[in-house]
Amino acid sequence: MSVLNVTLKDNEYKIYIGKDSILNLRDYLKGKSRYFIIADHNAFINHGKQFLKDMNNPPEDMIFVSGEKDKTLQKAETILSRMVQAKMTRSDYVVSLGGGVCGDIAGFCSSVYMRGIKYFQIPTTLLSQVDSSVGGKCGVNLKEGKNLIGTFHQPSGVFIDRSLLDTLPEREMKCGKAEVIKTALIKDSSLVEKIDSGHDITSIEFIESCIDIKRKVVENDQFDYGERMLLNFGHTLGHAIEAISGYGKLSHGEAISIGMAVITKLSEKYHYSESGTYDHLIRILKMHGLPYEYKEDMNKLFNYISNDKKNMNNKMNIVFLKKPGQAYIHSTSLVNLYNMLGSL
Ligand SMILES: NC(=O)c1ccc[n+]([C@@H]2O[C@H](COP(=O)([O-])OP(=O)(O)OC[C@H]3O[C@@H](n4cnc5c(N)ncnc54)[C@H](O)[C@@H]3O)[C@@H](O)[C@H]2O)c1
């Protein structure tokens, strides 16, 4: 088992990676019998029994979430009420057992419940094991857009067990692959080379490399004012594409995949990326069965982007690849972006 330390200015926690890593959670809960589980429905069906067996004490209560449609303020309110009914106090714990949706809403509820209680992440999807479980970004969606309500609240520990992914549907696995590919593309040319040569990008080695990259980025820029924005590569367009197509039609990963492709087509056309970057990206996406074509109206895309929370004073920070393995932040005006998108 490997252990990575996330060291922040006012906080520190560990990421345990490997089989049986979840057993370490028992030590955190020792003597603190009170904890509340927020679990993804499918993750719990498949792994809940074993999880409860692994813990010494049963939880006070538990509540289930089921995918993106549950990432709402209404659901958060229901969870928070149940936490009150379970008489959770600030010295108790929340445990999230699920993917990115579960982790984001569990973190959000933990951050606002009595002005903040501790929580742990047990990520059960590839996306959450390589990305969302670390870094403390939590939140819910509004009908106006994804993740518009949120907080920064770091978990007190993250427990990654690759075997939890054995029950993950193929489509969800693909979703996580898009984040693995994103992570390699923005930061690590040696990982890109491994992807090119056909390594299994869902292996524990890839998971560890990706979460280690995330850890370092978060350590350098906890509150997303600089380097952390690189993790948004493909996401500004991806979120827009996901919303325009109607939540649930395209998976998050599929939308991000198309977002990475569209933005790289644009950046190469305007010489922000080295020539060949787009073709290289498309080769990788095709290798992993990920979509890359955006077929809807560019105006719809632009209208959605103009309302993005990353859009400040009609300027946007966009992440471009210089080349695969190296990304940078480019600031542009909305008008400029509109013209560039319109020319694709
Ligand atoms: N906080 C962050 O830094 C961050 C980063 C990236 C993405 N996100 C968020 O993550 C969310 C997407 O996360 P996700 O892709 O994990 O989706 P998800 O949590 O909805 O899970 C995807 C599907 O897999 C099922 N599932 C989960 N674990 C399972 C298992 N072990 N076996 C069988 N089925 C299982 C779920 O029921 C769901 O249907 C988005 O809301 C996105 O905004 C957050």
Image (spheres, grey):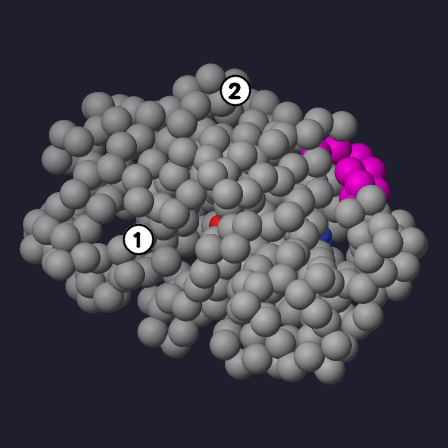
Q: Position of residue 60 (x, y in %)?
A: 82, 70
Q: Is 157 rendered above or below residue 97? A: above
Q: Is 139 rendered above or below residue 74? A: above
Label drawn at residue 237: 1
Q: Secondary structure at mark 2?
A: helix
Q: Quadrant of residue 313?
A: bottom left
- Residue at the image point whose x is 80% and y is 52% from the top: 29
Q: Is 259 rendered above or below residue 196? A: below
Q: Is 247 rendered above or below residue 26? A: below
Q: Position of residue 5 (x, y in %)?
A: 61, 32
Q: Taking 221 as reference, is 43 left or right?
A: right
- Residue at the image point whose x is 21% and y is 29% from the top: 273
Q: Badge 2: few (under 14), some or many (20 or more) residues near its Cα, within 10 Å?
A: some
Q: Quadrant of ligand 1?
A: bottom right
Q: For this rendering, which residue is in front, 157 or 190?
A: 157
Q: Position of residue 49 (x, y in %)?
A: 88, 58
Q: Taking 29 as reference, is 247 left or right?
A: left
**Which range is magenta?**
17-25
- Residue at the image point whose x is 81% and y is 64% from the top: 34
Q: Quadrant of residue 134?
A: top right
First reached walking from the N terminus: tag 1 or tag 2: 2
Give the labeled residue for mark 2. Answer: 194
- Residue at the image point whose x is 57% and y is 60% from the top: 107
Q: Secondary structure at mark 1?
A: helix
Q: Amino acid at mark 1?
A: Leu
